[in-house]
Image (spheres, helix red, strand yellow):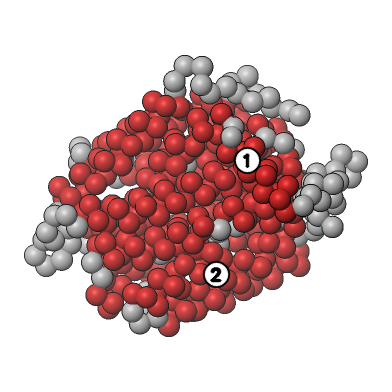
Amino acid sequence: MSVTARTADAPAPGMARLIAVVFLPFAGGYFLSYLFRSTNAVIAPQLTAQIGLTAADLGLLTSCYFLAFASFQLPLGLLLDRFGPRRVQSALLLSAALGAGLFALGDDMVDLAIARALIGLGVSGGLMSSFKAITLWFPKDRWPLVNGCFLAMGGLGAISATAPLEAVLEFTDWRGVFLALAAVTVVVAAIIRVAVPERPATGVGHGTLYEQIAGYRVVFGDRLFWRVAPLTVTTMTANLAIQGLWAGPWLRDVAGFDRPGVAGYLFAIAAAMTVGFVATGALADWCGRRGIGLIPVIGGLAAAFLLTQAAIAFELAPTAMLPWLAFGLMANGAALVYPLLNRHFPIALAGRAATGLNTLAFFGAFAGQYLLGEAIDLWPPVEGGGYRPEAYRWAFGGLLGLQAASLAWYLLPGGTREPESAR
């Protein structure tokens, strides 16, 4: 029996119970997703030295996570809408655990790339399964706020991959870290499987496989989807590629910080991002109660994010922390597109709408992380290791230009209309 539809007559559990048995177990999986995603920003020097990687190699290795992640998004949407987030997420996390174990044992680029891809596959449902669970269990008018609080759990994972990870590396190496992560991931998978309740079905997901796949035709044929998709893809690409990998090398090569200094800045960026998750959700909730829709909020946050990147790309204050704090704070304004689409599409398509957008976003992240490395490699490395400041300037500036074009498309008059808030 399908478990993915919301029932009108089933009594809703209290908020405290929902947080304990729905929010927190899925938050554990998303915490791990961001931790896995961000570790290479800290362990990059060790990987480069021990495995012998170029900038392009490092970008490709790190982006294998995003390639596997993105490739599974469309099947993931079908699985979520048909079998529900509890079953899907608990099974997928076992792939992440396997990948973490293999990464710890890897000795060359191929071994590490395969392991990284298995991790990406395993955490590919971390966000989307949680968004699906939120749409099933929490009130619709609180989705932006709940989503923002949930995304903050990912921010805590990103924080853990900065100074705390650097501290752990004083006692073990990156291989020991990944062995420990493999064990923790198995535990989180078991908690989700055992603790999260099922949501009774009301008929969603009983169609044939062809009918389920046909739902993507509705999603990808929708005008609002294609108005918001370019902005979401380019801003998420910038966030994931820079914060997840290239911020660390930039802080070393442009700002001139040593390893503890880089780790401290990465910690501050991740902390600001965590605050930003909650703040953007709270802002959307506050605006919604005053009749201001998500569309202008998303546009304003995206414009602010572009300004912070301009300050970084063009080195207005290369050693200042403020631009990086603003980067973290504004980085995930585009995540408000997910509750926007959940309101726009019927609940039966919620999983497919979110994963359809996520497919584009994470293929963009894969391409962005790899191509930034390729662009940086166009300039010869400096003596003693590292990359030239002008290489970062052109690479970051090119990505900024793509985001500016996407924001202009999003803001075209008459193209983006607020969906009804209730159905």
The furthest residue to the top: 413
The furthest residue to the front: 210
Which mark is first along the chain, 2 or 1?
2
Residue at the location (34% across, 62% down)? 60
Tell me the residue that label 1 is attached to: 217
Q: Quadrant of the C terminus?
A: top right
Is 172 drawn above or below residue 127 in the view shown?
Answer: below
Residue 270 is left or right of residue 373, and the answer is right
Is 120 drawn above or below residue 147 in the view shown?
Answer: below
Residue at the location (13% across, 55% down)? 379
Mark 1 and mark 2: span between their CA atoms? 30 Å
SS of the residue under disc 2: helix
Question: Looking at the picture, how far across and down is residue 373, in whole percent?
Answer: 27, 56
Residue 423 is left or right of residue 167, and the answer is right
Viewer can see residue 43? yes
Question: Looking at the picture, how far across and down is residue 87, in whole percent?
Answer: 72, 63
Question: Looking at the picture, how far across and down is residue 133, in whole percent?
Answer: 70, 50
The furthest residue to the left: 383
SS of the residue under disc 1: helix
Compare residues 282 and 420 and report the one nearer the observer.
420
- Hey, what amino acid is under mark 2? Ala
Residue at the location (84% across, 50% down)? 201
Viewer can see residue 304? no
Is 292 drawn above or below residue 307 in the view shown?
Answer: above
Residue at the location (63% across, 19% down)? 291
- Hey, what amino acid is under mark 1? Arg
Compare residues 265 and 395 and report the one nearer the observer.
395
Residue 30 is left or right of residue 58, and the answer is right
The residue carrying pointer 1 sits among few (fewer than 14), some (14 to 19) or many (20 or more) residues within 10 Å by Cα, namely few
Compare residues 237 and 16 and report the one nearer the observer.
237
Point out which mark residue 124 bears: none
Tell me the residue that label 2 is attached to: 96
